[in-house]
Amino acid sequence: MGFLKNLTKQILLVAIIFYGLPIFWYTYNGMDDDPESEYFLSVRFLMSTGSLLAFMGMAYVTLPIDFVPDWIPILGKLDDLLAKMTFGGGIMMCYMGYQFGSGEVPREFQVPVTAVRTVHGAVMPVVKEKIVPLIVPAMQAIAVPMKVAAKAVFRIVLQKVQDPETVMNLADKAREL
């Protein structure tokens, strides 16, 4: 019964991702009317396109059955990575549209923008005052031994490379592979 439930969820999410969301976006932006080229730089178009990309990326990650199974080397994880990158790109497109797009911000986007600004305004002072002072000394303490270790490894590598016999041995081993 679990397989049937997952299959139903899969079909519903795929229909929403690849049919419902693009149709909604197409209608919302009035693409039937063949908009002017300036429209593609508007806040409305950029934020709605960013939202579409973010929702599609997030919905793909939530699919119970991947299009490319994760057990396939490289490609199995690549589709999930691309979906997450699509989500991030969509969020960035929303931000860029809000900051640099032309025209007024549509009313339907004002509520999320206000919510994000409010949370950012409340959280960032706490992060700057409480968390950053705790992290900076730890990062500085880690950085010093890492620099020393990196210099030591680099010095050893340079010594090995200056020895011609070592270079020839490495070249022979590479050819055998």
Image (spheres, grey):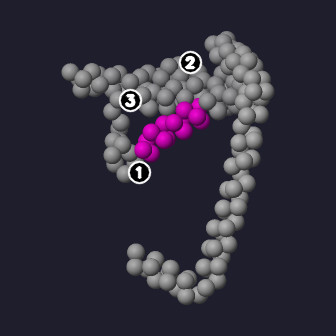
Q: Nearer the viewer, residue 100 or 6?
A: 6
Other residues around mark 2 within 10 Å, as few (<14) / some (14–19) / many (≥20): few
**Residue 117 percent location from the top left of the image:** 72, 19
The circle drawn on residue 74 is: 1
Give the dominant element type of the magenta stretch: helix, strand or loop: helix
Regarding residue 101, the answer to whether it shows in the image is no
Q: Nearer the viewer, residue 53 or 64?
A: 64
Q: Residue at x 64, y 83 (%)?
A: 162
Seen as rendered, the residue at the extreme left is 1
8 displayed left or right of 46: left
**Residue 139 percent location from the top left of the image:** 71, 44
Q: Residue at x 74, y 47 (%)?
A: 140
The numbered mark, 2 or 3, whose residue comes first in the sequence reads 2
In the displayed structure, 145 sits above or below 51; it is below
Q: Residue at x 72, y 30 (%)?
A: 131
In the image, the segment drawn in magenta is 77-90
Amino acid found under the numbered disc labelled 2? Tyr
Cα gap from disc 2 to disc 3, whole angstroms: 25 Å
